[in-house]
Image: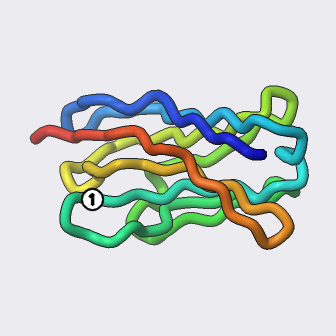
Protein backbone atom coordinates (compact mmCIF):
# COMPACT_ATOMS: atom_id res chain seq x y z
CA UNK A 1 0.00 0.00 0.00
CA UNK A 2 1.33 3.43 -0.95
CA UNK A 3 1.07 6.33 1.43
CA UNK A 4 1.96 9.88 0.51
CA UNK A 5 2.57 12.57 3.11
CA UNK A 6 2.97 16.19 2.08
CA UNK A 7 4.70 18.85 4.15
CA UNK A 8 6.05 22.36 3.80
CA UNK A 9 2.89 24.35 3.30
CA UNK A 10 2.19 27.57 5.15
CA UNK A 11 1.55 31.28 4.90
CA UNK A 12 3.81 33.43 2.75
CA UNK A 13 3.65 36.91 1.27
CA UNK A 14 3.29 37.43 -2.43
CA UNK A 15 6.67 37.24 -4.13
CA UNK A 16 7.98 34.80 -1.56
CA UNK A 17 8.94 31.15 -1.80
CA UNK A 18 7.94 27.84 -0.29
CA UNK A 19 9.22 24.32 -0.75
CA UNK A 20 6.78 21.45 -0.54
CA UNK A 21 7.87 17.90 0.02
CA UNK A 22 6.08 14.60 -0.42
CA UNK A 23 7.27 11.41 1.24
CA UNK A 24 6.36 8.15 -0.51
CA UNK A 25 6.13 4.93 1.44
CA UNK A 26 6.45 1.52 -0.12
CA UNK A 27 8.94 0.12 -2.58
CA UNK A 28 7.58 1.37 -5.91
CA UNK A 29 8.78 4.97 -5.80
CA UNK A 30 11.47 4.55 -8.44
CA UNK A 31 8.89 3.06 -10.81
CA UNK A 32 6.29 5.75 -10.16
CA UNK A 33 5.51 8.93 -12.00
CA UNK A 34 4.93 11.72 -9.50
CA UNK A 35 2.92 14.91 -9.73
CA UNK A 36 1.61 17.87 -7.80
CA UNK A 37 -1.95 19.09 -8.12
CA UNK A 38 -3.77 21.85 -6.31
CA UNK A 39 -7.28 22.84 -5.41
CA UNK A 40 -8.32 26.37 -4.58
CA UNK A 41 -11.54 27.10 -2.66
CA UNK A 42 -14.56 26.71 -4.91
CA UNK A 43 -12.49 25.40 -7.81
CA UNK A 44 -11.71 22.03 -9.28
CA UNK A 45 -8.45 20.30 -8.57
CA UNK A 46 -5.87 21.11 -11.25
CA UNK A 47 -2.55 19.68 -12.30
CA UNK A 48 0.53 21.77 -11.47
CA UNK A 49 3.64 19.80 -12.38
CA UNK A 50 4.85 16.26 -12.93
CA UNK A 51 8.05 14.28 -13.06
CA UNK A 52 8.32 10.85 -14.62
CA UNK A 53 10.19 7.91 -13.16
CA UNK A 54 12.93 8.81 -15.65
CA UNK A 55 13.13 12.39 -14.42
CA UNK A 56 11.35 14.19 -17.24
CA UNK A 57 9.43 17.21 -16.00
CA UNK A 58 6.40 19.08 -17.22
CA UNK A 59 4.61 22.16 -15.90
CA UNK A 60 1.28 23.87 -16.19
CA UNK A 61 1.62 27.18 -18.02
CA UNK A 62 0.61 29.17 -14.96
CA UNK A 63 3.66 27.96 -12.98
CA UNK A 64 6.30 27.72 -15.72
CA UNK A 65 9.40 29.65 -14.77
CA UNK A 66 8.32 29.90 -11.12
CA UNK A 67 7.96 26.32 -9.83
CA UNK A 68 10.44 23.47 -9.99
CA UNK A 69 9.60 19.82 -9.39
CA UNK A 70 12.30 17.37 -8.41
CA UNK A 71 12.65 13.89 -6.97
CA UNK A 72 15.11 12.09 -4.76
CA UNK A 73 14.95 8.39 -5.49
CA UNK A 74 17.20 7.53 -2.56
CA UNK A 75 14.92 9.29 -0.08
CA UNK A 76 11.65 8.44 -1.85
CA UNK A 77 10.61 12.06 -1.92
CA UNK A 78 9.38 14.54 -4.47
CA UNK A 79 9.63 18.28 -3.95
CA UNK A 80 8.00 21.35 -5.39
CA UNK A 81 10.03 24.53 -5.11
CA UNK A 82 7.64 27.44 -5.49
CA UNK A 83 9.10 30.88 -6.20
CA UNK A 84 7.56 34.25 -6.99
CA UNK A 85 4.35 33.14 -5.38
CA UNK A 86 1.13 34.92 -6.25
CA UNK A 87 -2.11 35.31 -4.32
CA UNK A 88 -3.76 33.07 -6.90
CA UNK A 89 -1.40 30.24 -5.96
CA UNK A 90 -3.34 29.88 -2.71
CA UNK A 91 -4.67 26.32 -2.58
CA UNK A 92 -4.33 22.93 -1.01
CA UNK A 93 -1.48 21.17 -2.78
CA UNK A 94 -1.66 17.42 -3.29
CA UNK A 95 1.00 14.92 -4.18
CA UNK A 96 0.08 12.08 -6.54
CA UNK A 97 1.88 8.87 -7.43
CA UNK A 98 1.02 6.85 -10.50
CA UNK A 99 2.18 3.27 -10.76
CA UNK A 100 0.89 0.54 -13.02
CA UNK A 101 -2.21 2.60 -13.91
CA UNK A 102 -3.10 3.10 -10.24
CA UNK A 103 -3.14 6.52 -8.64
CA UNK A 104 -2.37 7.35 -5.04
CA UNK A 105 -2.98 10.72 -3.39
CA UNK A 106 -1.75 12.42 -0.28
CA UNK A 107 -3.93 14.37 2.13
CA UNK A 108 -2.68 17.72 0.95
CA UNK A 109 -0.90 20.69 2.45
CA UNK A 110 -2.30 24.22 2.59
CA UNK A 111 -0.45 27.05 0.87
CA UNK A 112 -1.72 30.56 1.52
CA UNK A 113 -0.22 33.55 -0.25
CA UNK A 114 -1.08 36.95 1.18
CA UNK A 115 -0.98 40.25 -0.68
Please identify the quarter of the rendering in which residue 108 is found.
top left
Query: Residue 17's x, y, as percent?
Result: 37, 33
87 or 96, nearer to the observer: 96
Residue shown at 86%/29% (left/top)?
A: 74
Query: Residue 85's x, y, as percent?
Result: 31, 44
Residue shown at 58%/53% (left/top)?
A: 105
Task: Decide if residue 36 is on the left or right side of residue 32.
Answer: left
Residue placed farthest to the front in the image?
1
Q: How many marks are shown on the rendered structure?
A: 1
81 or 91, nearer to the observer: 91
Q: Residues within 10 Å of mark 1 (few under 14, many from 20)?
A: some
- Please say whether residue 56 is visible from this viewpoint: no
Residue shown at 50%/35% (left/top)?
A: 20
Query: Residue 63's x, y, as percent?
Result: 43, 59
Q: Mark 1 sits on what residue?
A: 40
- Please say whether residue 13 is visible from this viewpoint: yes
Dot 1: what SS? Answer: loop
Amino acid sequence: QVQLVESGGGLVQAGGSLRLSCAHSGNRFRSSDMAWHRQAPGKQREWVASITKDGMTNYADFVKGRFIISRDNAKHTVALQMNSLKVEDTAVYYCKATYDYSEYWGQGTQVTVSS
